[in-house]
Image (cartoon, rainbow, N blue to C red):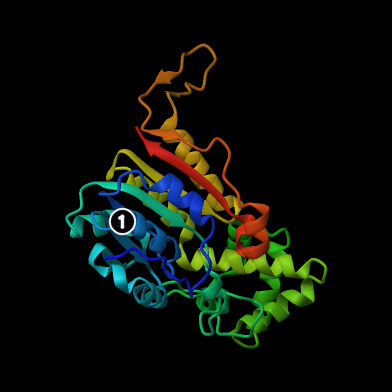
């Protein structure tokens, strides 16, 4: 079968060449794309490892899987599609009888397709149903959070996951408004916030609030930590973990995980007690995160906030 470049219709993959350069070290290996999306990165990976390698593509969004299957249909003999959350990577690989992988890719956050698609409720730029679920099979959505969480719970979500300074005031406004009428759309929520915060600060505030709700709905930060931890048990020596994050909360989790697993000692916590030596499990290959070039940032605005970190199993 002749290798051909896969046309991407879902969204433009970020740092595509850098991902390929760092991730694929063994063309005959098994790789996991834990955030398959429309298959943008997967297309390049499968081209590199075809015909002897295997790619497991995982995504919680059924629409993303459908798009990826269409984009990558010529490579299906070397692809395994899984509709699940990558936090379940241990159970997924065990069910597939896969004991070793050569690499894991996580391109975090929400895709431009998901932001633009009607009915998903990820964006504040359109009046849509408050949803934000990556996986429509789960029951918790943004509407339930907005209308059932206490004011204190809402404020905590907005502060922890959005780092929003007006979290308590916004939470109080939400509770006041829902007392007369349930808040059901992104437009209604944006209007409530707009009465509290005005331009030039409104757009960034809305972005932080919507980010916080999306993270809470999909349990994104806990899922990320679990995925990284469980993937270690399957990663072969020389195998690599490549993670692209889009905000400081994600990046901090990745950075801390890589530092912990690459450490040669554990601090004792006392200046008179020596540190405890440990055997490092990872070698960090990116002392500073890789960011998109100026050219890529211009052609693909989504790449502006992207930070890519890479570590290799020792």
Q: Is residue 168 left or right of residue 46?
A: right
Q: Which residue is mark 1?
A: 89
Query: Is the N terminus in the top left, top right, bottom left or bottom right quadrant?
Result: bottom left
Asked whether the viewer can see residue 154, the reply is yes
Which residue is at 26% across, 54% downward? Answer: 53
Foreground of the two, 276 or 77:
77
Q: Looking at the picture, does residue 191 appear above or below residue 85?
A: below
Percent position of residue 174, x then y: 66, 75
Which residue is at 52% across, 38% downward? Answer: 286
Q: Looking at the picture, does residue 280 appear above or below residue 169?
A: above
Counting labels gives 1
Which residue is at 63% across, 85% downward? Answer: 127
Q: Looking at the picture, does residue 283 appear above or below residue 154?
A: above
Percent position of residue 210, x then y: 61, 69
- The quadrant holding residue 22 is top left
Q: Residue furthest bottom?
A: 181
Query: Is the C terminus in the top left, top right, bottom left or bottom right quadrant?
Result: top left
Q: Residue furthest front?
A: 2
Q: Is residue 223 left or right of residue 190?
A: left
Q: Looking at the picture, does residue 263 appear above or below residue 19?
A: above
Which residue is at 38% across, 69% downward? Answer: 60
Foreground of the two, 142 or 68:
68
Asked whether the viewer can see residue 152, the reply is no
Percent position of residue 92, x then y: 26, 59
Percent position of residue 62, x then y: 37, 76
Foreground of the two, 103 or 160:
103
Question: How many residues crowd mark 1 within 10 Å: few (<14), some (14–19), many (20+)?
Answer: many
Label 1 residue SS: helix
Foreground of the two, 77 or 131:
77
């Amino acid at each position: 079968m002749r290798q051909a470049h896969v046309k991407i219709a879902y969204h433009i993959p970020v740092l595509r060449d850098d991902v390929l350069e760092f991730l694929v070290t063994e063309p005959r290996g098994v790789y996991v794309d834990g955030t398959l999306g429309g298959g943008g990165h997967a297309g390049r990976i499968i081209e590199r490892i075809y015909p002897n390698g295997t790619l497991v593509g995982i995504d919680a969004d059924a629409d993303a899987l459908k798009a990826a299957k269409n984009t990558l249909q010529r490579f299906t003999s070397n692809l395994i599609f899984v509709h699940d959350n990558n936090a379940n990577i241990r159970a997924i690989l065990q069910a597939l009888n896969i004991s070793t992988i050569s690499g894991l890719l996580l391109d975090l956050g929400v895709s431009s397709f998901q932001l633009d698609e009607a009915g998903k409720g990820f964006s504040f730029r359109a009046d849509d149903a408050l949803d934000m679920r990556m996986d429509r099979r789960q029951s918790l959505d943004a509407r339930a959070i907005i209308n059932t969480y206490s004011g204190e719970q809402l404020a905590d979500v907005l502060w922890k996951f959005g780092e929003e300074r007006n979290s308590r005031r916004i939470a109080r406004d939400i509770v006041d408004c829902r007392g007369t009428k349930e808040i059901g759309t992104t437009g209604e929520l944006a209007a409530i916030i707009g009465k509290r915060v005005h331009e030039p600060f409104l757009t960034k505030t809305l972005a932080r609030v919507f980010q916080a709700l999306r993270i809470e709905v999909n349990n994104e930060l806990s899922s990320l930590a679990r995925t990284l931890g469980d993937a270690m048990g399957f990663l072969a020596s020389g195998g690599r973990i490549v993670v692209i994050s889009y905000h400081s909360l994600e990046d901090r989790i990745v950075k801390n995980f890589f530092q912990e697993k690459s450490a040669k000692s554990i601090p004792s916590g006392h200046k008179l007690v020596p540190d405890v030596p440990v055997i490092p499990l990872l070698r960090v290959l990116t002392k500073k995160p890789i960011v998109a070039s100026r050219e890529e940032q211009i052609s693909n605005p989504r790449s502006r906030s992207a930070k890519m970190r890479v570590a290799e199993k020792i």
